[in-house]
Amino acid sequence: MCVSESDGRRMEFLQELKQRQIAIEKEIFEFLPIEQGRQKILLEAMNYSIKAGGKRLRPLLMSEVFLLLSEIRHDNANRTLLTPFLAAIEMIHTYSLVHDDLPAMDNDEYRRGKKTTHAVYGEAVGILAGDGLLNLAYETAMKAFDITEECFYPRIIQSLQVLSKCSGIYGMVGGQTVDVVNNGILSDREELLWMYQLKTGALLESAVCCGAILAGGTKKEQNLFLEFAKHLGMAFQIRDDILDIYGDIKLLGKPIHSDEKNQKTTFVSLCGLEAAKEEVIKQSELAVQIYDQNFGKFRNPKTDFFRQLVLELITREK
């Protein structure tokens, strides 16, 4: 069977994506706790949660922005400055999933094709595993101080500020609160999009912003990537809404119709499938436009992977 040129390029991209995900996983796993001591069961649950798979999207985006701006700016920051933050943001994302799966939240038993943490270790240990991952994330990020020169300390401090704000009450946790308080039922489109921006978008924003900061990006470049991430996060979440209804359970590795089962408002249930598809296209085009207009002139085989990654995320089937 003949493979078209575009299919061939996509296959090459997916192979490269897999290699980069594996490399980032290896970096993340270096910071995981050793499963020993009287709290061993907690450490096992934390490691189980992290090692359960996933796209590693947030550390991947952080890494790609860091590489892109380092290439453009010829910055001398070593990747060792970045690695603690790659692990930290994945720990924060994973803790949010562990808590999101709990009976008090979505009460899901499967994620990424495996039993959720509370389904394996019990609800109490599941809660503690999430707590442990959140605290370990900041402990890990602060290790950047120990492995780099003092001249990079301001970048580390600023990145810590961005990460904590975007994952906290003015970011991811704030968005989750709106979801919980309203029992997932929202009747206003703008409120739903506001919740999406915080619950999903904020951590994506912190990923690209930290990547830019650690690479020595200017304030203008940081703001451009923030704006880019807002549109990408919105497209990503609405695409997720579509997949929850029309996705393939084998590809997704988790049950579909979860939002419907929990009677949660999604963009699809509020505005309809066609409107959701149109919004994904709109937000995607805005994200790509920001990238092309501001960084397109620097495109080369090294930096072009980032653009391909964005396009893959918003057309994904899992």
Image (spheres, rainbow, N blue to C red):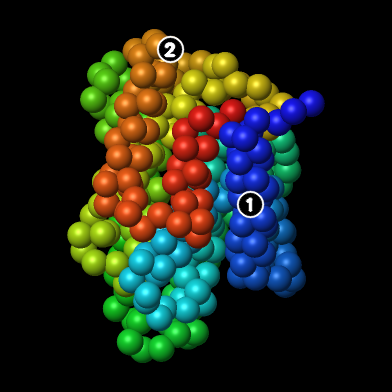
In the rendered structure, are the residues bearing label 1 and label 2 in contact, judged by CB atoms less than 8 Å apart? no
Rendered residue at 40%/49% (across/down): 203
Q: Which residue is mark 2?
A: 273
273 relative to 123 in the view: left or right? left
Name the residue type under label 2.
Leu
Q: CA distance from mark 1 to mark 2?
A: 32 Å
Rendered residue at 57%/16% (across/down): 246
Q: How many numbered circles does the render carry?
A: 2
Rendered residue at 30%/40% (across/down): 289
Q: Residues within 10 Å of mark 1 (few under 14, many from 20)?
A: few
Quarter of image, res 228? top left
Which of marks 2 and 1 precedes in the sequence?
1
Q: Which residue is mark 1?
A: 16
Q: Position of residue 184 (x, y in %)?
A: 40, 24
| 221 up-or-down from 237: above or below | below
**SS for dot 2:** helix
Quarter of image, res 248? top right
| 290 up-or-down from 262: above or below | below
Query: Is residue 278 visible from the viewing direction of this image?
Result: yes
| 45 up-or-down from 105: above or below | below
Toward the left, the furthest residue is 220
Name the residue type under label 1.
Glu
| Front tag of 1 and 2 | 1
Q: Which quarter of the figure is the C terminus placed in?
A: top right
